[in-house]
Amino acid sequence: MGTITKADTLLASAGSPAYNDSTILDERRRSRINRELSIWALRIGALSVFVFSWSFVTGQGIMDPTLVSTPDAVGTSFIKQLGDGTFWVDVTATFSGAMAGLVSGAILGILAGVVFARVEVLHVAARPFLTLMNSLPRPALAPIFILWFGLGFGPKALVAFSVVFFVLMTSTMGALQSIDHDIKQLTQSLGMTRKQRFFKIELPSALPSIVGGLRLGAVYSVLGAVVSEMVGAYTGLGQRLVVVTNNFQVSETFAILLAMGLLSMVLDLSISGLQKLVTKWTR
């Protein structure tokens, strides 16, 4: 048997296809596309099963359609409301209140979280009061805010603020306090000031968690605005929901609930894009 020389090995490797960077990128791209297709297939499949089951139980008389409506009736009611001008007035009222509560609650919540994380004595002193305020049920706060500010924009923004503030404060404090103690010791040994350590180490490390809390706060801001509107308001999806429910308009009720869910999804998707940018920047 002949021996395999180094030249034969080089010729064999030269004849084989090159596994270069472009091949790796192509494989990653195909893997990402397949993953996205699988995700959308699962979503569409789950939605189809839900709609089919709903149609089946109402069509077979297992559940009374007058109590749970039907998918086609809900879809018709939703499309009908999209063409109603007052519906968009209510959407704008709810969205503006939720956004005001989200922005103000996020800014003050993040600032409070930073202050409490850096000044532990202040946080320990304020903890009982923060726990007391956070434990107050938001539907109970809505009538007080309405009594103070009337049936307008203020109460829904304040209820949304009361929810978002504590979500962002908690997520900010948790993110800043979870930074490795060894990293803090290393920055001190390098002679970094507290300001430099905060902006170069602590804040970039905490940003993903803060933005994650912001996503949760965006959903809760819509819930807070709707709760306030259900207690009392001139306009808004919450007030619209109370009216159609009291009139036993079940399909319209589910259509409004669908609109609320879509509104929360829009906010969540917007902040999700911000979260991806922050994640790339902090890597």
Image (tube, grey):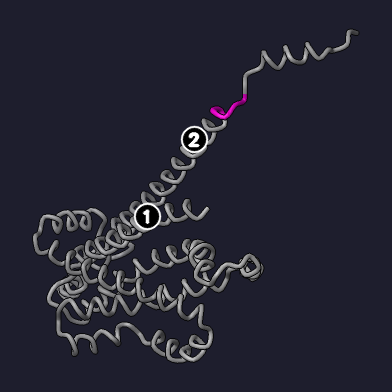
Q: Residue at x 49, y 39 (%)?
A: 32
Q: Is residue 9 above or below residue 186?
A: above
| Disc 2 residue type (three-letter) | Arg
Q: Which residue is under mark 1?
A: 50
Looking at the image, residue 247 sits to the left or right of residue 68; the answer is: left
Residue at x-position 46% and y-position 75%: 114
Choose the circle earlier in sequence order: 2 or 1. 2
Q: Quadrant of residue 77?
A: bottom left
Instruction: Name the residue nearer the viewer: 10 or 242.
Output: 10
Examine the residues drawn in magenta and state their main secondary structure: helix
Point out residue 12 in the picture as x, y percentages from the top left corner: 72, 14
Within 10 angstroms of label 2, few (less than 14), some, or many (20 or more) residues? few
Q: Nearer the viewer, residue 176 or 96?
A: 176
Pick the residue in front: 113 or 188.
188
Amino acid type at mark 1: Phe
Position of residue 158 relative to residue 189, above or below, is: below
- Highlighted range, magenta: 19-23
Q: Position of residue 260 (x, y in %)?
A: 26, 64
In the depicted structure, whether residue 31 falls above or below residue 83: above
Judged from the image, the secondary structure of the residue bearing numbered disc 2 is helix
Decide if residue 183 is on the left or right side of residue 67.
Answer: right
Q: At x 30% / y 73%, what residue is drawn?
A: 104
Residue 29's disc is 2
- Provide residue 241's location: percent of width, then percent of height: 20, 71
